[in-house]
Image (spheres, rainbow, N blue to C red):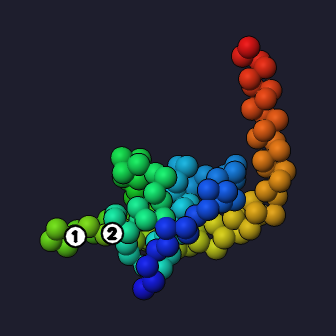
Amino acid sequence: MRELSADMFDELCPSTVSPVKVGDKWGALIMRCLEGGPRRFSELQVPLSRVTPKVLTQSLRTLERDGLVERSVDGRQVTYALTSLGRSLLEPLAALCAWAEEHWDELVDAREKGTVHLARRHS
């Protein structure tokens, strides 16, 4: 199994502007990390360095609660893996990522307009 790369998710990753979330803000990215097989928490932290350990734990628990990820404990080692339900979401997730990449400029423009509109409304 390949190691996870620290630059696996660019700060400008299309998933950051996608209006659709899996689990929570980081759920889809965690699932992408797990598509190659089970990973330890420390392995997940490499490409998800922008996520605090506390938030990563919360996101993993959300995915586990939703039946998408399973947590296994073997002695002192804890690993996380996609369930069959989680694996069934990989193809739609890839399609969503492709859609977000295709519509990147429109999504960013809409967010910027929305931010300006909200700032004016609250001033």
**Farthest residue, direction left:** 75
Label 2 environment density (alpha carbons within 10 Å; few <14, some 14–19, many ≥20): some
Q: Is residue 9 visible?
A: yes
Q: Residue at x 74, y 23 (%)?
A: 119
**Element assignment for label 1:** strand
Residue at 49% over, 73% down: 5
User: Which numbered tag is attached to residue 40?
Assistant: 2
Q: Amino acid at mark 1?
A: Gln
Q: Earlier in the sequence, mark 1 or mark 2?
A: 2
In this rendering, the answer to whether 102 lies above or below 115 is: below
Q: Position of residue 92 (x, y in %)?
A: 66, 68
* Residue holding disc 1: 77
Q: Quadrant of residue 82?
A: bottom left
Badge 2 marks a residue whose secondary structure is: strand
Question: Residue at the spot x=79%, y=29% of the render?
Answer: 116
Q: Are marks 1 and 2 in contact (CB under 8 Å)?
A: yes
